[in-house]
Image (cartoon, helix red, strand yellow):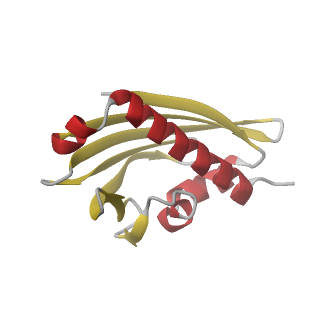
Amino acid sequence: MPKFSGQETIKSDPETIWAFLMDPKRFAACAPAMKNVKVKNEREFSFEVQIMGRGIEFKAKWEDLQRPTYARQKLNGGSMLTGGAKMDNEFRISHAAGVSTVDWTSDVELSGAAKMLVSESQLRGMVNEMIQDAVTCIKGQVETQ
């Protein structure tokens, strides 16, 4: 299972970053692949991603929340045609001297057609690009001047 990780510094307090990460609709504005976000409750939501020309539903659940410093999320989605994907994401937020540091990890597991059609290097490229785009957007939304 490929593992991705990174660290970003954001000129904002942990509560503001936390609030942004916990709001699926605000976060989706920074992740263009996420469409039709539906919030079930404060811990669960779903969204669609276009894969092979089809809208594939993903379900997300926050498994462990320690406001405002730690969150763990599980995502699961796919179909018989496209295969599936599971993700286990963690976010750690620390703060010092007016700047917050967000450390994140993401374990990704593909199955079925998705696993056969996407190489690990292709997956790394796609995930890294999506994450960098999202981080740039998030910084623009929450950074204080």
The image shows residue 117, relative to residue 15, as above or below, that is above
Q: Whole-percent x and y of residue 71?
A: 47, 44
Q: Which of the pair 27/20 is nearer the observer?
A: 27
Residue visible at 45% across and 47% down? 65
Position above or below: 74 against 51: above
Labels in figure, total = 0
Q: If the image is split into quadrants, where does the C terminus sit? A: bottom right
Residue lying farthest to the right in this orientation: 145
In the rendered view, does 95 fall on the left or right side of 83? right
| Quarter of the image where one finds residue 38 | bottom left
Residue closer to the observer: 99 or 2: 2
When the figure is inspected, residue 117 is found, relative to residue 33, above or below; the finding is above
Residue 110 image offset from top left, x and y in percent: 25, 38
The answer to which of 29 and 23 lies nearer the viewer is 29
Residue extending farthest left? 80
- Corner quadrant of residue 97: top right
Look at the image and tell me in which quarter the N terminus lies: top left
Left or right of residue 103, residue 86 in this image:
left
Q: Nearer the viewer, residue 21 or 30?
A: 30
Residue visible at 59% across and 58% down in the picture: 20
Q: Residue at x 44, y 32 (%)?
A: 124
> Can residue 23 be seen from the camera position used here?
yes
Q: Position of residue 117 (x, y in %)?
A: 25, 39
In this view of the protein, can residue 45 be seen by the observer? no
Query: What residue do we see at 76% from left, 53% from top?
Result: 143
x then y, percent, for residue 67? 55, 48
Q: Is residue 78 left or right of residue 46?
A: left
